[in-house]
Image: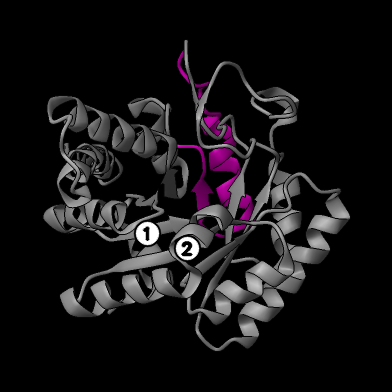
Amino acid sequence: MKTLREAIKEAEEKGVAIGHFNISDTEALWAVFNSAKRLEVPVIIGVSEGERDFIGLRQVSALVKSIREEYDYPIYLNADHTYSYDRVREAIDAGFDAVIFDGANLPGEENIDLTKKAVSYGKSAGTDVLVEAELGYIGKSSKILDEIPEGVQISGDNLVKPEDARDFVKETKIDLLAPAVGNLHGMLKNSPNPKLDIKRIKEIRELCGVPLVLHGGSGISDEDFQSAIKAGIAIIHVNTELRRAYREGVEKTLKENPDELAPYRFLKGGVKEMEKVVERNLKLFNFLN
């Protein structure tokens, strides 16, 4: 079985991106896995601090590993948006394939120092865990937004400068970089999400020399997705869109079957809608549609 590092390298060589989908229960895990398996493409499961607290840190690690081993399938686990060194360490100790230290909203030097500390621990673990960091603030919440959150950088000089990305990667020795390139977490309610700065993505990838990760994939246009992949994005995160599909699918099922009490029956509606979202995005990221 390929490591995540090898899977990312192969994706870049093919000119495609690996889809990253967040979960907080087994229903979402099966929805993501089943969709990826039908298309025969690798996939990354993401769990934020809140999501892994809900499902269980070691439990989600064991679940993903069991699927990988039973089906001999390239499914990987990432500790998404981790805000402290201690929580980075616990995810690495639990056997995650990757972890994100998110210090994007910290002062520059503090972000660098803590990121270096996370990278050092990852290298000492002996598991080839990938350490990712963020540069530029794009918000925190995966939800439907009335407006762009305060402090989020979406255009012009507020976005990550390629030279700053290069220096950050050189200083921290991270494996993956998630830069602010016009993306934001969450989906705007009454308008499309901002367009990505494709030229900037290309310049950052060429200068920094490590694979790039696009956070806040929900609400981005198909054209921007594929242009971003061609410019150097190797992994794309989707969460808000998946959460909305889950909720709407469950609500529809309960409306049609108001007396249903068995969770394994009414949750199926949510799984079905999530699979549609995952499959559509994976086709897009792998240029299969």
Query: Residue 117, located in which quarter of the rendered image?
Result: bottom right
Residue 154: % across, % down: 64, 26
> What residue does disc 1 label?
44
Q: Is residue 9 visible?
A: no
Task: Report if residue 192 lies within the magenta region.
Answer: yes
| Above or below, 180 relative to 12 | above
Quarter of the image for the C terminus: give it: top left
Choose between 156 and 270: the one closer to the eye: 270
Q: Residue drawn 17% across and 44% down?
A: 268
Asked if the residue under mark 2 is in contact with the one under mark 1, i.e. CB atoms within 8 Å, the reply is yes
In this rendering, position of residue 36 left or right of residue 191? left
| Above or below, 107 relative to 83 | above
Q: Tag 1, which secondary structure?
A: strand
Q: Residue furthest top?
A: 190
Q: Residue drawn 27% across and 79% down?
A: 1
Give the Cα distance between marks 1 and 2.
7 Å
As shown in the figure, which amino acid type bears the numbered disc 1?
Answer: Ile
- Magenta stretch: give its range: 191-217
Q: Is residue 86 visible?
A: yes
Mark 2 or mark 1, which is nearer the start of the sequence? 1
> What residue does disc 2 label?
78
Q: Residue drawn 17% across and 32% down?
A: 253
Q: Residue drawn 18% across and 38% down?
A: 269
Choose between 235 and 106: the one closer to the eye: 106
